[in-house]
Structures are given as C-alpha cells and as structure tokens.
Image (spheres, rainbow, N blue to C red):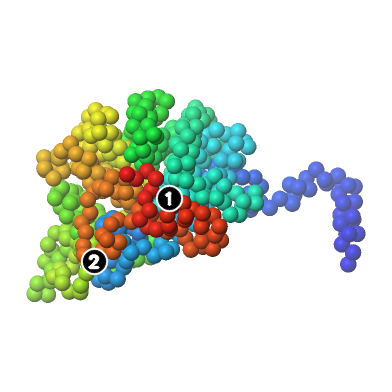
Amino acid sequence: MNFKKIFIAIVGVCSIASCTSDFEETNTDPNRLQAIYPSTLLSPIIYEVASHGMYRSWSHNNHFMQDIVAFPSNTDGIQRYDFSDDIGSSSWNAYFRWMKNARDMEAEAVKVADPNYQAIAITLRAWMASNLTDLFGPIPYFDSSKGDEGVLKPKFDKQEEVYKSLLEELEYANSLYDVKRPMNFRPDILFVDQSTYWLRWQKFTNSLHLRLLLRVSNKAEMNAYTKMANIINDPIKYPVIENNQESVILDITGVTPNVSPWSRIQDFTLSRKMASFFLDNLVDFKDPRLPLYATEAYRVVDKKKVYIGYKGIPSAWDGPDSQFDYEASGLNNIIAKNPTKAPILTYAELMFIKAELGVKGYLSDAKLHYEEGVKSAITQYGIEVPADYFENEKAAFDGTLERVMLQKYYALYMVDYQQWFEHKRTGLPKLPKTQSMLNDGNMPNRFPYPLSIRSQNKDEYEKVKAEMGGDDINVKMWWQN
C-alpha cells in the first residue's frame, strides 16, 4: 500500500473541503492535557511529598527519636542507631523526583507570567531541598533535575551554599506574591479557600523561611536571629501562620487518590509499641493527647485484662520480650487511617520558634509563646487543654530551652524528619541511652548516600565523600555545633 499517496489524497480532500481550519481541533485527544498550567502540577506534589514525609516519620524518624519501638522482635537496628547503607534511598528518590516537578512548575509559571505560582513553586522546592540536605548534607542542588539539559551526573553542592540559596529564594518568593491577583483556577488540596488562597501560601513561604533560619542559627555568619526578628516584627511584609486554622496540614480525605500512605492500616501498628520516653513525659504532663497517640497498657490477671495506664517499651531494649510483665501501649491507628492529617508546618511550630527566640533574648514573652505552642499542639487535634495544665511543674514554663524543645518534640510528631533535625541542632530533648545502642550510643547525624548514587554518579560521589571525610553517619551537618 502506498502511504504517501494516501497522505496526499487526504491533504487534497482537506484542501477542497476547506477542512484545514479545524483539523487540529478534530484530532485533539479530549482525555489528554494539551498544555500544562502551573496549577496542574501542584496537588500531586503536595500529596506525594506530605504523605511520604508522614510515612517516613513513622518508619524511620520515630524509631531513633524514641517515639515508637519494634516489638516483640528486638532485631530492628534503627532504634539502636544501626543505619543500613540504603536507609535514605526512598527519601532521596522521592524528594528529587518531586523537586523536578516543582522546577517544571516554576518554569511554566515564569512562561505564563504568573508570579504567585512561581512563588509557590519556589516554596515547594525549598521545602523538599531543605529536607534533603538535612538528611544527607551536601547534595546535588544547582545542577539537579537537569537531565533534559544533558546534566546526567550533577555535582554535589556544599550544604552552606544550598542553605544560602534557599534563604535567598524564599525571600524572593515572598516578594513575588500578589494576594489581590484573581484566581483563574481552583485551589489545591492543601489550601481550599479561594478568598485567602494566595495569602495562605505566602504565610507558608515565610513560616518555612523562619524554620530554615532557625536551623542555621548556630552559624553566626548567617545573622539568622536578626533576620528572624525582621520577619516576625513586620507582619505586613512578611505574613506568617497566625493560628491553628492556618497551619500547613494536608487533610487526607480517604477519597482516591488522596488516601492514607498506609494501604493496610494494620501495618501501622503491627510489631510496634510506643516507646517509654515518649509516653512517660506525656504521663508526667498529664497530657490529654495520650489516648490520641496510644492505647492503654494492661496485664492479664485471672484471664482478665487489667488496664494500667500508658506504659511503653524502652528504646533499644535487649533480652527476651518476656521480661515485660505487661502488654505495652500500642500505636493508635486513628493517626493513620482514612481520613487523617499529614502535618507539614504548624502554628505550634511557629510558636515554639518564637519561644526559643524569647528564651535566648531576641523576643519578649517567651512564656506566652511557649504556652501558646503547647495549647495549639493539643487543640489542633480537637482536644481540649485542661485548665490546670500549666500548674503542673512538669509542664509549666521554666525559662529553659530544654523545656521548650521537649514540648516542641511532641508538636513535631509525624512531621517528616523534623524531630531528628531539631535534635541534631540542639541536642534536645535529651534521649535516654541503653547498653545495646550501637554507634557508642551517639545519635547519627545523617543518612549515607544511596547505593544507586554511588554507582550512577560515582566520580561526583567520590569527590564529596573525600571532602566530607567519609560517607559516614557521624559526619555533622554544616549547621551543627
């Protein structure tokens, strides 16, 4: 069959019938996007990154930060600071994959001259990149996500350079927002109110800016405290999260595709118990969040369950499970089952940032911010704060950073790896050690680079490895003391 003649015949018929004007429209697939607007990319990025962070908080962070323990098996190495060579591969892949989408979103926003979506894309990229560099240290950043430009083996950038860029980019993003600009598209799955949509994103941008400035505040050359005070003291130029309703929390509806990251809800609780450290402090606080996080422990007496309150298992426990003469508190699966919430950056976190600045003398009203942080961390779950909560000496503000960081630890529960990052920055809260902990009982500072990177980008990997003094879990972050 002569396909050339057939093609010519079709063109000839179209010419005679004057059908060229609607040929493209007639042959358009109605089920395929013909153009990508920045908003098209937004909800998938939000869902994938937020749900990944929540899942990895449970599978990784919560073990070495003594929220939960593996039980009845005691072979799990994470709670003993025994990190596998590939422990961070899932987060490396997820964050880089969706950073690429955020870069694409930013490019499209620039192309269509939409500064608000450009600012949102920068914010998303900074959120992911900051988590990446705080997990691994130096990362490919400036040359990452450029495979379509032929950059297949990007160089690793120093953490200091990455952070300086992120902070500059968030400052720039804030300057781009036009909160009076009309919306031509529906809101995303994170912020659903069209009347406040742009402002909510701007508040996320500036609140993230505060988180990252605090992260680098141990480095005097970053002048972080002055910059944080400038943001906090100028709410017109730098609006930030002001109440629980403005917290950046993804509502997971349970309606596909916005579903819980646990496809089998029983996996959330299977072979896990709550850790003693996590529960014991809440018991001391007489905290109303206990039944939200955990089930009650019990003993069996005369074949009947006798409940004994909230009692966990020590992290990195050793010996037979029979040493525990009680059934320890388990995880409450309400945290994981549909519908649920994936926290990203909350009002409580902002209040604890302010409380820390108050303790260090950069802001006034440290006590007020501390108490507001505690209250918001509790009430964001719809739980009422007991009237006498702060009359308890264990929960009352005592003017110390230790007290602030202990309550912040609970406010950061299930917020990706933020508990770990803040512990690396401050050494707080002080976690108990056991003889069965490895790494001399020292909390690791980073994940090793993924095995795939060691082979696929070997030359750049060897360079950064030499610069760091080894791809070791004890190599400190640039911002650590």
Residue at 49% x, 36% y is 169
Residue 148 appears in the picture as rendered: no
Q: Amino acid at mark 1?
A: Gly
Q: Position of residue 248 (x, y in %)?
A: 38, 42
Q: Position of residue 402 (x, y in %)?
A: 21, 43
Q: Earlier in the sequence, mark 1 or mark 2?
A: 1
Residue at 21% x, 37% y is 371
Marker count (numbered):
2
Residue at 29% x, 68% y is 271
Q: Amino acid at mark 2?
A: Ser
Q: Quick one: 66 or 271, which is closer to the camera?
A: 66
Q: Quick one: 390 or 441, which is closer to the camera?
A: 441
Please determine whether, in this image, residue 372 is positioned above or below residue 59.
above
Q: Which residue is mark 2?
A: 436
| Left or right: 27, with 350 as reference point | right
Name which quarter of the figure residue 36 lies in.
top right
In the rendered image, the quadrant that contains the N terminus is: bottom right
Q: Which residue is mark 1?
A: 137
Element on which disc 2 rests? loop
Q: Mark 1 near mark 2, Cβ–Cβ under 8 Å?
A: no
Q: Position of residue 336 (x, y in %)?
A: 34, 57
In the rendered image, the quadrant that contains the C terminus is: top left
Query: Of all residues shown, which one is farthest toward the left?
Result: 302
Per the model, the C-alpha gap separating discs 1 and 2 is 27 Å
Please determine whether, in this image, residue 363 is positioned above or below residue 313.
above
Element on which disc 1 rests? loop
| Left or right: 246, with 155 as reference point | left
- Is disc 1 surrounded by few (<14), some (14 to 19) or many (20+) residues within 10 Å? many
Which numbered tag is attached to residue 233? none
